[in-house]
Image (tube, rainbow, N blue to C red):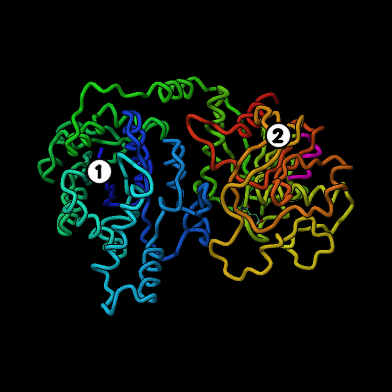
Amino acid sequence: METKYIFVTGGVVSSLGKGIISASIGKLLQARGYKVTIQKFDPYINIDPGTLNPYEHGECYVTADGMETDLDLGHYERFTDIKTTRHNSITTGRIYQAVIDKERRGDYLGKTIQVVPHITDEIKRCIKENATLEHFDFVISEIGGTIGDIESAPFMEAIRQLRWEMGRNAVNIHLTYVPYLHAAGEFKTKPTQHSVKELQSMGIQPDILILRTEHHLEKGILHKVASFCNVEPESVVQSEDMLSIYEVPVNMLHQGLDIAILRKLGISVEEAPIMMNAWYDFLDKQLKATREVHIGLVGKYDLQDAYKSIRESLTLAGIYNGLKVRIHFINSEDITCQNVGVKLGSMAGIIICPGFGQRGIEGKIIAAEYLRTNDIPTFGICLGMQMMAIEFARNVLGYQDANSREMDIQTPHNVIDIMENQKSITQMGGTMRLGTYECKLVQGSHAYEAYGKVILIKERHRHRYEFNNQYFDEYEAKGMKCVGINPAANLVEIVEIPDKRWYIGTQFHPEYRSTVLHPHPLFMSFIRECAQG
Ligand code: GLN
């Protein structure tokens, strides 16, 4: 089948869940046997979100090929199990960089470089690129931001042109918001009408409208929106709040969103069975997972989205273990030797979160000591693993001043050190050790058992600092074992204390590989142990 393109835009307000809708569309098309990919365009000027503070942008998601991307790619992967790449996350910064590089090379042969056509052409090239590298039946392109933003205008122009050029091979989906005004006791469709008008003023006629709403909308409202916005009634669906984001694909399916898309693209909708059994099984498990388990996240970003993939990985692993995971954020900046027991003592298990820089690390180290000495299941991820190693060096190896070079450049006991090939790096963007690397597990270790006794695993990374192998033997002798090693560079990727119930730190980020249908084995094993407490 010739590749079809689906453009997803958003109106009225941000945070409507365009990423979840895009992922849900991907899921439904995939369930009909189509090969799908989903990409995100972010209208900001950063080249990628790698240098952004999580408070600005939430978590930075890392693809297998080492691109630092928007957290929506996490939704795409979790919903569809596809492996995204650097071609699935593109910012205005990257578009301009590509155009300026071409200009400097002289590729434009003396032309004046303009937003239209040069920037829009580059956007169009990026939209079409995925399908030139590999065949896809559908390419879903989600445009970040809200209609009317100055910075998203070139993207709108690009999809306008593509829809016009591609005709029936492209479809525009617009996600808007229908608020309920309590004082008036009514739903209001005016913001949606304005949003669609704004789109139309840019030459874009939405083919399908998805109305986000907190409460169920009666048919009359959908019809009203359809007639005001020049959209067929069967092409207006609603996305009301669900108990879990994983119910959204099924809600869209029940309203025929996939059929509306296929019809618009001129694809015949036979009785093609939609293979959603595994997804339904998962939803069934979710419904039955009622026993609560309380997990603490020790980190410094008091923002839901900052640890998105970790939260989702915990929730998913919980569901597969028949448990409802209750996540409690514990700010590491507030943890002291005096209050650590009160703050952490009632948790069934703790995640020591990833991060950068000095702020909040002493709290993570105090937490690690408390968790180790009280034998509470503990999972340290990246910086979290490094803090577990520093705590062990300070309190077991006897190096009171042990630290990471990241935090203390002078430290005499640099148990966490900068990686050799990072020393000469001066550019901060996109230069960490990023993406998938192999790791060889030590047979018989907890980690090896958790992975189902496989020797060689592959996980994604995002760091500059590493376990210092000069201390390897001391750690091993005193009981913290290095049980996962990268064979090519001899880097320590996993440490654990085998005498403890579950005390494992990973230099990599397993959370990026957890999906709805394939929860991550380490999270599965961690939650299983937490539930024993
Ligand atoms: N700041 C640490 C490093 O660069 C850990 C990074 C992380 O947690 N992702 O090595």
Residue 407 lies left or right of residue 24; in this view the side is: right
Viewer-side residue, 32 vs 72: 32
Residue at the spot x=30%, y=41% of the render?
138
Cα distance in 3D space between marks 1 and 2 = 48 Å
Q: Looking at the picture, does residue 336 appear above or below residue 451?
A: below
**Left or right: 242 with respect to 362?**
left
Q: Assign a secondary structure to mark 1.
A: loop
Residue 328: x and y in percent read 59, 40
Q: Position of residue 467 (x, y in %)?
A: 75, 52
Residue 464: x percent and y percent?
65, 58
Which residue, as the protein is rendered here, is positioned at the far bottom?
A: 110
Specify which label sits upstream in the sequence, 1 or 2: 1
Along the line of sight, which residue is nearer the eye, 218 or 137?
137
Secondary structure of the residue carrying tag 2 is: helix
Q: Closer to the observer: label 1 or label 2? A: 2
Which span is picked out in magenta?
368-375
| Residue 253, label in figure | none
Q: What amino acid type should be assigned to the residue bearing mark 2?
A: Ala
Local crowd size for mark 1, using a 10 Å CA cut-off: few (<14), some (14–19), many (≥20): many
> Could you tell me what secondary structure mostly forms the magenta stretch?
helix
- Structural crowding at the residue carrying mark 2, measured as other residues with C-alpha within 10 Å and reported as few (<14), some (14–19) or many (≥20): many
Question: Tag 1: residue type?
Answer: Val
For image coordinates 30% across by 36% down, the residue present is: 239
Position of the C terminus, as image quadrant, is top right
Q: Quadrant of residue 42?
A: bottom left
Q: Position of residue 84 (x, y in %)?
A: 45, 45
Q: Which mark is residue 447?
A: 2
Identify residue for label 1.
Answer: 178
Q: Is residue 371 above or below residue 113?
A: above
Determine the quadrant in which ligand 1 lies.
bottom right
